[in-house]
Amino acid sequence: MWRVADVVSGVAETETSRTIGLRVAGLDGYLAGQHIDIRLTADDGYTAVRSYSVATAPMDEVLEITVAELADGEVSPYLVRDLAVGDQLEIRGPVGGWFVWRPSNANPVQLIAGGSGVVPLMSMVRAHEASSNPSQFRLLYSLKSPAAGFYQEELRTLGVESSRFSVDYVYTRSVPAGWPSAPMRLTPETLLANILPVDAAPDVFVCGQTVFVETVAEWLVQAGYPAATIKTERFGGTGGTR
């Protein structure tokens, strides 16, 4: 079912990405990790539909998505550059029942993100922090550079103040000032050194570009993490679309 969402906020995350807040009448909750479809219709009747992961926790009044602009995209440039507060969008969802986290799940959780793949994982982090679930959450965030990171201040604050959440970074092209190591590609050794150990029996969520997700999932299985505990979400481009 398509419904109308009011655009209530728009905040830049990076030079080419933007977090958009939507108020949706009749929205009756959703699960952390789900996504919505957005439909744009041109004056000549041509329509384009794209899917975007939800970044907010289910109890939040405003639903947020974070969109990374694709240079050749039909939808993302408009959402990042032109969409204004007060505009309306047609949306469907949130939907999805596989790549989700529920507060009733008592297992520790390892999140692994490549670039904009952090968006649905951020929904899980926020839902976990808002709940009374005592399980440990850990995020490994792989980025080309510090400037490419989403939700930087919030993740920094949570990493310091939360007793249930920690975040580790791998920078592949450039590092922050004072960073203790040079840029490096994510390797099996780096991966295993920065995630919950296999004997902690974590549920693992991996999101990012297809090659990143498939490679990380293969390394995890080779290291002994049961395939049944690894859930993946992937996208083919460099933006936030699914």
Image: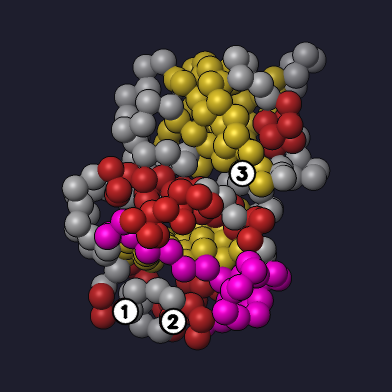
Name the residue nearer the viewer: 213 or 106.
Answer: 106
Which amino acid type is marked by label 3?
Answer: Glu
Q: Percent position (x, y) of residue 175?
A: 65, 70
Q: Is residue 214 visible?
A: no
Q: Is residue 221 above or below residue 102?
A: below
The image quadrant that residue 222 belongs to is: bottom left
Please give the residue where the numbered disc 2 appears in the rendered image: 193
Please give the residue where the numbered disc 3 appears in the rendered image: 13
Name the residue nearer the viewer: 25 or 171.
Answer: 171
> Of discs 2 and 1, which sits in the foreground?
2
Q: Secondary structure at mark 1?
A: helix
Q: Which mark is residue 198?
A: 1
- Numbered range of the magenta stretch: 162-188
**Residue 179, magenta (yes or no):** yes
Q: Which mark is residue 118?
A: none
* Disc with the residue nearer the chain's start (2 vs 3): 3
Q: Residue furthest front?
A: 178
* Disc with the residue nearer the chain's start (2 vs 1): 2
> Of discs 3 and 1, which sits in the foreground?
3
Q: Secondary structure at mark 2?
A: helix
